[in-house]
Amino acid sequence: MLNSIKMVKMKKAAILFMMFLITGCIFSQSKDNRNESGRHLKPAGLNKFYGTWKYEGQDEVFTIVLVKEEYFNKKNGDKLDFAVGYHSYKKDGALIDGYDVGGKNTITTGSFDKKIDNENVLSFRFRETKNRVNARGTLTYVKGNPDKLVLKLILAEGGGMISIDGKGGQYKLHVPNNIELKRVK
């Protein structure tokens, strides 16, 4: 009889152990990489773009500050991380475009472009504040140097193409383009 009591206790312990094991396996699975309702999607590699990036040329300084922002989708409850931020462009010490500190976001929806499929290229929307012109931009890591990025901006089609002279002349960006930025923070 003593052996049968021990046997029952061992079976209960084994069942309890299996329940804990199965429960642990279920809860240990990553929730960040699957697009299911209520998940927090964190694109791998996005963190390396956050920070302050600067270009210094002859009498001009162009700075980009990127931070993480979570977008909440009300329809399915998902959260998605994006890179957002602002820029400032100074010439001879005077602010030409953008914001000095804590300004409104001029860089939005920064994430990896699925067409490019490269974690070293961040695609984003850019808004020049002086003439309220929109552009598409990319920041690409310089090969072999994690503290340098190349910025490229392309005017957005449709909205954002305006005439600066009233005669149909096409607008061009005031901020520098196709430049190499260095991480400062």
Image: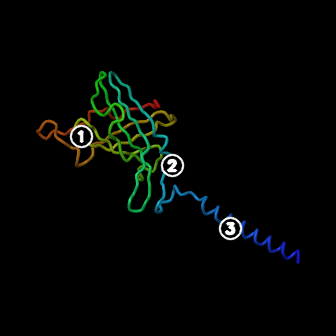
Q: Indicate the secondary structure of the residue bearing disc 3.
A: helix
Q: Residue furthest right?
A: 2
Q: Which mark is residue 44?
A: 2
Q: CA distance from mark 1 to mark 3?
A: 59 Å
Q: Indicate the secondary structure of the residue bearing disc 1.
A: loop
Q: Disc 3 marks which amino acid?
A: Met
User: How did the renderer colour the structure?
Assistant: rainbow
Q: Disc 2 marks which amino acid?
A: Ala
Direction from residue 88 to residue 160 in the image, left or right: left
Direction from residue 156 to residue 169 in the image, left or right: left
Identify the residue at horizontal 44%, vertical 44% (top origin): 68
Q: Disc 1 marks which amino acid?
A: Arg
- Name the foreground residue: 183 vs 9: 9
Q: Which mark is residue 132?
A: 1
Mark 1 vs mark 3: give the one in front.
3
Q: Earlier in the sequence, mark 1 or mark 3?
A: 3
| Residue hosting label 3 | 19
